[in-house]
Image: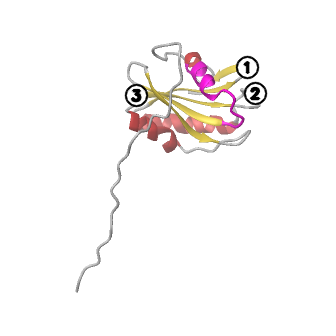
C-alpha cells in the first residue's frame, strides 16, 4: 500500500523598503525625538495608526513600520504584530506610537492595557519597549514612560 504524500510550503521572509522619513537626529534617545519623527510620518492621516519605530543597540533607527490602522477612535492589535518587524529587523528596542485624530492625547483604558501587554512580550523576547507615545498634530504628545505606565 502506497503512503499518501502531503506538500509542505517553503517560504522566504523578506523586508521591503517602501520609502524614508527625514529626521533631525542621528539616534533617537528620547520620547520627544521619537514623537517628532512619528508625527512627521503620520501627518495628515484621518484614522488611528499604530506605528513601531525600531532601533539598534546604538539607538539608530532601523525603520518605521505601520503595524495597524484603525478607525477614527479605536485600534485593535496583538503584540505579535508589534514584535514581528522588530525580530526581522534585529531591533534591540523600539518606540510604539499611535495618533489620536481627535486631538486629545489622553490615553484610553485600551491604550494602557495594550502597553502592559507589549512590555510583558518585550521582556520575554529581550526587546525593550522604550516608550509608547500618543501623538496629535495639534497638542504634541503624551509619553507612557513619563506618566509611569512603563
Q: Between marks 1 and 2, how big is the CA–CA gap?
A: 8 Å
Depth check: give the residue in front, 24 or 97.
24
Label placed on residue 92 = 3
Q: Between marks 2 and 3, how big is the CA–CA gap?
A: 31 Å
Residue range highlighted in magenta: 34-48
- Determine which quarter of the picture holds residue 16: top left
* Direction from residue 95 to residue 142 in the image, left or right: right
The residue carrying pointer 3 sits among few (fewer than 14), some (14 to 19) or many (20 or more) residues within 10 Å by Cα, namely many
Question: Which of the marked residues, 3 or 1, is nearer the chain's N terminus?
Answer: 3
Residue 136: horizontal and vertical position, in percent?
70, 25
Label placed on residue 139 = 1
Question: Which of the marked residues, 2 or 3, is nearer the chain's N terminus?
Answer: 3
Which residue is tagged 2? Answer: 104
* Direction from residue 30 to residue 13 in the image, left or right: left
Q: Between marks 3 and 1, how big is the CA–CA gap?
A: 30 Å
Q: Contact (CB < 8 A) between labels 1 and 2?
A: yes
Q: Is 87 located above or below residue 134 in the figure?
A: below
Label placed on residue 113 = none
Amino acid at each position: 500500500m502506497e503512503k499518501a504524500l502531503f506538500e509542505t510550503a517553503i517560504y522566504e521572509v523578506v523586508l521591503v523598503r517602501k520609502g524614508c522619513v527625514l529626521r533631525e537626529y542621528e539616534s533617537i534617545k528620547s520620547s520627544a525625538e521619537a514623537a517628532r519623527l512619528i508625527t512627521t510620518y503620520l501627518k495628515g492621516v484621518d484614522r488611528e495608526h499604530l506605528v513601531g519605530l525600531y532601533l539598534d543597540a546604538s539607538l539608530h533607527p532601523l525603520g518605521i513600520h505601520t503595524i495597524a490602522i484603525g478607525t477614527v477612535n479605536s485600534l485593535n492589535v496583538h503584540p505579535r504584530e508589534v514584535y514581528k518587524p522588530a525580530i526581522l529587523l534585529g531591533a534591540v528596542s523600539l518606540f510604539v506610537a499611535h495618533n489620536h485624530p481627535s486631538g486629545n492625547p489622553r490615553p484610553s483604558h485600551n491604550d494602557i492595557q495594550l502597553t502592559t501587554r507589549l512590555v510583558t512580550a518585550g521582556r520575554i523576547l529581550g526587546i525593550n519597549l522604550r516608550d509608547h507615545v500618543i501623538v496629535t498634530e495639534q497638542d504634541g504628545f503624551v509619553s507612557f514612560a513619563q506618566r509611569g505606565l512603563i
